[in-house]
Image (cartoon, rainbow, N blue to C red):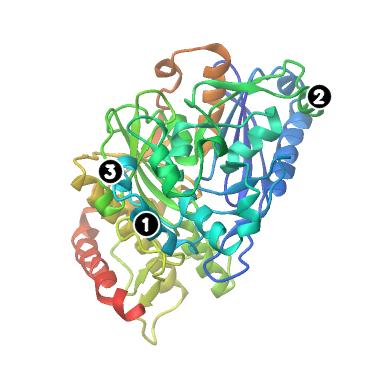
Amino acid sequence: MYLGLDFGTSSVKGVLIDAKQKIIATASAPLKVSRPQPGWSEQNPEDWWKACNIVVKTLGKMKPKAIAAVEGIGLSGQQHGATLLGKDGRALRPCILWNDARSFRECEDIEKAEPRAREISGNIPLAGFTAPKLLWVKKHEPKVFSQVAKVLLPKDYIRFRMTGEYASDMSDSSGTYWLDCAKRDWSSKLLAAGSMSIDQMPKLYEGTDATGRLTPAVAKAWGMPKRPVVAGGGGDNAAAACGIGAVTDNAALVSIGTSGVMFVSNDQFRPNAGRAVHAFCHAVPNTWHQMGVILSAAASLEWLATVLGKPAPKLTAALGSKLTGPSAALMLPYLSGERTPVADAQIRGLIMGLGHESDHKTLTHAALDAVAFAFRDSLEALKDAGTEVKRVTAVGGGSKSELWLRIIATVLGVPVDLPAAGDVGGAFGAARLGLIAATGADYRKVLTAPKTARTIKPEPKARDAYEAHYRRYASIYPAIKEIYR
């Protein structure tokens, strides 16, 4: 048996699979985000550990024999979070999350300190990355900064609690802005630019490697007498790609979660920092990937649901599943700033084209359109980097909305596949990595694509209207960015 744990922003998910990769059981536990100031986003690392224990013990109650037979565990997690530990291994402050925008000025500091930063990393420094967060702490919380012994990403903090090891994988570490992604190693120059040292970094592994075993105490508490090995795992999107077999050149997925991601696997390192494409290591050896990233995907719909006082599923259900064209309103979904292609942590969203006739259906449709247009922005940026996307597989909570998938397929102009295994995302991919680490199996034979349940094709009758609407959408940011500032 093998266990995958995915540490997301809104929940921790667990998936148990057997040697044939059949899903035996799933469980989840919710998480909350703290926003102490506008643009800030934090979580208490202890809450991850509590939720992790709830998930594992829930699975243990459901399938005690299966839990007792676990031999490998894989980890997947939200990227970029700065978990700062003192010499005693305790967290010094709440973790600053991926969608926290406070450190935008520190991005400039990094490039001033190291003019070749983009060339070394292959990426543009962004406020969401880990390195600028540490510079912010240095400026504003110097006492905390002076005590930092280790910096871990969220899933790697859980690994530390599980195994006592300070370790990370290549895909997750790519998002710190301390990694030379082409060389798959920490960069002394990027670390120096961020006022950090190699001693403060975890040891690097491939996602398929074993990084340690559960401590005897944790193994006993979880009912796992075999003390399973813990795989390197991956950042949430790389792990989700492992879950759907997107580990070969040009295999692509669209993840519609709290954030949104257009993910393409590459057999070479293909950066395009100029348009804020993320060029990272994959969770498997000698493989990389590109990502266009939307900071507020399903989060845009959830925000609207809160404002309107209606659950998001009811809002989308009211629209039905037929697609005749775009909403009369246009929304810019930059609620937490945006990454691809604008790399602007300060910009915020808007809704335009409102009239007396506008209702909750108009606004809901506009939110779905906006996320699809943001994915289109990412697709265009990937094209500029020499990547061709012919079809995508949809994962994440948003993939449950057929209308949303129709809109995305139409706006992107490519078919959207839904995997037969359902939405298991990063947790399933992590479980597969746990299997590989425990057995030494060839990842190419394990990380195969699941069967496709169905394919959503672009809607020809709505294509022209959406193309015109996207052109209007693409003109909004250049027009407002200076007005907003």
Cβ–Cβ under 8 Å for marks 2 and 3: no
Quarter-of-image position of residue 305: bottom right
Residues 467 and 183: in front is 183
Q: Is residue 252 left or right of residue 436?
A: left
First in residue order: circle 2 vs circle 3: 3
Q: Is residue 116 left or right of residue 76?
A: left
Binning the other alpha carbons within 10 Å of mark 2 as few (below 14), some (14 to 19) or many (20 upward) gives some
Task: Confirm or deny contact between disc 1 and disc 3 (CB under 8 A).
Answer: no
Residue drawn at x 42%, y 52% is 260
Q: Residues within 10 Å of mark 1 (few under 14, many from 20)?
A: many
The image shows residue 235 at horizontal and vertical percentages of 49, 38
Tag 1 residue:
339
Quadrant where the C terminus is found in the figure: bottom left
- Amino acid type assigned to the residue bearing label 3 in the image: Glu
Residue 240, position as x, y percentages in the image: 47, 36
Q: CA distance from mark 2 to mark 3?
A: 47 Å
Q: Amino acid at mark 2?
A: Lys
Circles 1 and 2: CB distance less than 8 Å?
Answer: no
Three-letter residue code for mark 1: Arg
Q: Residue at x 57, y 64 (%)?
A: 140
The residue depicted at 50 percent of the width and 40 percent of the height is 236
Q: Is residue 315 left or right of residue 464?
A: right
Q: Position of residue 471 (x, y in %)?
A: 20, 65
Which numbered disc flags the more N-terminal residue, 1 or 3?
3
Residue 71 in picture, x, y percent from top left: 65, 17
Q: CA distance from mark 1 to mark 3?
A: 18 Å
Q: Which residue is mark 3?
A: 119
Alpha carbons under labels 1 and 2: distance apart: 43 Å
